[in-house]
Image: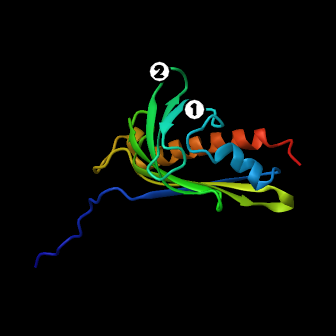
Amino acid sequence: MIAALPAAAHGPTRQKITLTTEVPAPPAEVWAVIGNFQDMSWHPAVFSTTGDGGNEIDATRLLTLGEEGGPTIDEVLYKFSDEKMSYSYRITEVAVETLPVTNYSSHLTVKPGSNGGSIIEWRGAFYRGYPNNDPPPELNDEAAIAAVSAVYQAGLDALAERFAGSN
């Protein structure tokens, strides 16, 4: 008798992370800073943002990281709501050396917090940078999660510092 063994190899799993921070500023004040898809100057890793389409669906932006001529990330907006203080976007092009992910989408939202403050939520879903089995360490699930978490945390920390003196 021959026993059939299940295949041990399978493709990557979609990873999801959510990071939040609470700031003492009212939601409208926070949204005024982060709610423009064409302006990511609030994030410390972003040297410049250029784009087309404002906050309309299918608007595009190009983030240049670090310094003039630094690595870039191309993104497209696919949901936007001033009323819900939320927008969603996808990366359309990024070198895995810059951010070790593929099929990345993200959602940035401002919600009412305690005592008139705000909760800023940044959610992402993505696959690791290496789509096949046995990824190198710099392109595996852990590397993708760590890299995206670091990007989100740096942005949220900068916003927490910016709004620390509010109210």
The reply, left or right, for residue 46 in relation to residue 128 is right
> Looking at the picture, how far across and down is residue 140, in whole percent?
40, 46
The reply, left or right, for residue 22 in relation to residue 115 is left
> Looking at the picture, how far across and down is residue 36, in whole percent?
61, 45
Q: Is residue 19 visible?
A: yes
Q: Where is 163 relative to 46, above or below? A: below
For mark 1, give the secondary structure. strand
In the picture of the structure, the residue carrying the numbered disc 2 is 69
For mark 2, give the secondary structure. loop
Q: Going by the picture, which residue comes out furthest to the top?
A: 68
The residue lying at 83 percent from left, 51 percent from top is 24
Q: Where is 69 relative to 162, above or below? A: above
The reply, left or right, for residue 116 in relation to residue 33 is right
The residue lying at 73 percent from left, 48 percent from top is 30
Front residue of 117/29: it is 29
Q: Around disc 1, counting alpha carbons within 10 Å, would you say few (fewer than 14), some (14 to 19), or many (20 or more)?
A: many
Q: Going by the picture, which residue comes out furthest to the bottom?
A: 1
In the picture of the structure, the residue carrying the numbered disc 1 is 46
Lower sequence index among marks 2 and 1: 1
Front residue of 143/82: it is 82
Q: Around disc 2, counting alpha carbons within 10 Å, would you say few (fewer than 14), some (14 to 19), or many (20 or more)?
A: few
For the residues labelled 2 and 1, say whether their Cβ atoms are less than 8 Å apart.
no
Task: Give how far apart the Cα atoms at labels 2 and 1 are.
Answer: 12 Å
The residue lying at 70 percent from left, 38 percent from top is 158
The quadrant the N terminus occupies is bottom left
Q: Amino acid at mark 1?
A: Val
